[in-house]
């Protein structure tokens, strides 16, 4: 069992709330290399030989199992690029807990680009949770550029839950999903930006199979002079259903652009999009203030509930 320093323990508490215990199937990437790793009976983690990253093999015996693969950067000036592939056998049910935390106390930028590809068989249930977090008293930027790609097999369900908590100066998030027959996607993005941070999200979901469906939900809060751009795209290539919902709270001098796109290429493709951007509701603030909360406390309560 690896001995973790105080910074690493603190970051793991932020990005892995289920608990990183170094038990079962796990891999902790620390400053560009694997610090510790373990397999379970039904999950095997193999280091790639041709490029940085791991291959995670999940067999059909995995039923309700968790796999923890967090990343921690604490070296200023480091650029860490990693390629992780997940191979999920027919009928498996698994939760994969990922995420990256950057502690930057220097003057150079620290960056992590994680490219994750999911190869999901038939009749699987896969939950993927990814949190991003930045901290440190240095002037160097904390940059995260995650890429998520998935092929979802017939009758399988993929739950994607991504969150950017705080402290990330710049992020470009790209997601591409292909859905087979009767496959389902439930994607939720929660995003917080502040100061002069920039966050860009691009998603494309291709509903290729008959009776496939997708639910895409983005909730974000933009504070300070930060800027967010959200561009989801749903392409219906068969009889399918998709719904895109984008809700943002705008504060201070921040900016938010929401650009949902729907593309129906089949007569029986039913795709809907909704988008709403606005300030915090005054009536909610007044109600909470009447209960004895300060304006700042009331705002925090509303934001926390909105991002749940």
Image (tube, rainbow, N blue to C red):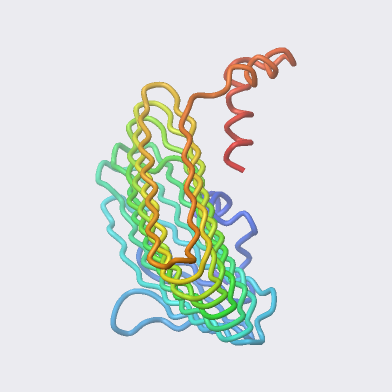
Quarter of the figure with the N terminus = bottom right
- From the top left corner, tell me how far across and down residue 195 is, in percent: 37, 30
Query: In the orientation shown, which residue stands out farthest toward the right?
Result: 291
Which residue sits at x=42%, y=40%? 167
- Closest to the observer, 264 or 118: 264
Q: Is residue 5 visible?
A: no
User: On the rendered structure, is 76 left or right of 293?
Assistant: left
Residue 24: quadrant of the picture? bottom right
Is 205 rendered above or below residue 64? above
- Closest to the observer, 248 or 264: 264
- From the top left corner, tell me how far across and down residue 204 is, in percent: 38, 60
Quarter of the figure with the C terminus = top right
- Closest to the observer, 21 or 63: 63
Is 128 rendered above or below residue 123? above
Is 182 rendered above or below residue 132? below
User: On the rendered structure, is 251 left or right of 113?
Assistant: right
Which residue sits at x=38%, y=41%? 258
Disc tally is 0
Q: Is residue 77 visible?
A: yes
Query: In the orientation shown, which residue stands out farthest toward the front?
Result: 267
Residue 234: quadrant of the picture? bottom left
- From the top left corner, tell me how far across and down residue 33 is, in percent: 38, 69
- From the top left corner, tell me how far across and down residue 101 is, in percent: 45, 52
User: On the rendered structure, is 213 left or right of 117?
Assistant: right
Is 173 rendered above or below residue 265? above
Which residue sits at x=58%, y=51%? 13
């Amino acid at each position: 069992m690896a001995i973790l320093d105080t910074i690493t323990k603190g970051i793991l508490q932020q990005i892995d709330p289920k608990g990183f215990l170094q038990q079962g199937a796990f891999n902790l990437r620390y400053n560009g290399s694997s610090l510790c790793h373990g397999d379970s009976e039904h999950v095997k983690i193999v280091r790639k030989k041709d490029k940085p990253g791991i291959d995670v093999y999940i067999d059909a015996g995995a039923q309700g199992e968790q796999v923890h693969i967090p990343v921690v950067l604490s070296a200023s000036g480091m650029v860490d690029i990693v390629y992780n592939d997940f191979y999920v056998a027919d009928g498996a049910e698994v939760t994969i807990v990922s995420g990256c935390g950057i502690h930057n106390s220097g003057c150079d930028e620290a960056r992590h680009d994680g490219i994750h590809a999911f190869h999901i068989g038939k009749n699987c249930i896969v939950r993927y949770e990814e949190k991003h977090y930045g901290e440190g008293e240095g002037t160097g930027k904390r940059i995260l550029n995650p890429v998520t790609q998935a092929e979802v097999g017939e009758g399988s369900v993929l739950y994607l839950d991504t969150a950017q908590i705080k402290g990330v100066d710049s992020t470009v998030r790209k997601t591409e999903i292909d859905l087979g027959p009767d496959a389902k996607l439930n994607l939720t993005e929660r995003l917080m930006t502040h100061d002069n941070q920039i966050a860009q999200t691009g998603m494309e979901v291709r509903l290729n199979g008959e009776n496939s469906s997708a639910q895409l939900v983005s909730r974000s809060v933009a504070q300070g002079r930060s800027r967010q751009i959200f561009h989801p795209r749903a392409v219906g290539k068969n009889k399918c259903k998709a719904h895109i919902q984008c809700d943002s709270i705008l504060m201070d001098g921040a900016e938010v652009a929401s650009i949902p796109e729907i593309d129906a290429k089949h007569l029986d493709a039913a795709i809907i999009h909704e988008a709403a951007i606005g300030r915090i509701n005054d009536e909610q603030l007044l109600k909470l203030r009447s209960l004895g909360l300060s304006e700042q406390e009331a705002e925090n309560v509303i934001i926390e509930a909105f991002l749940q």
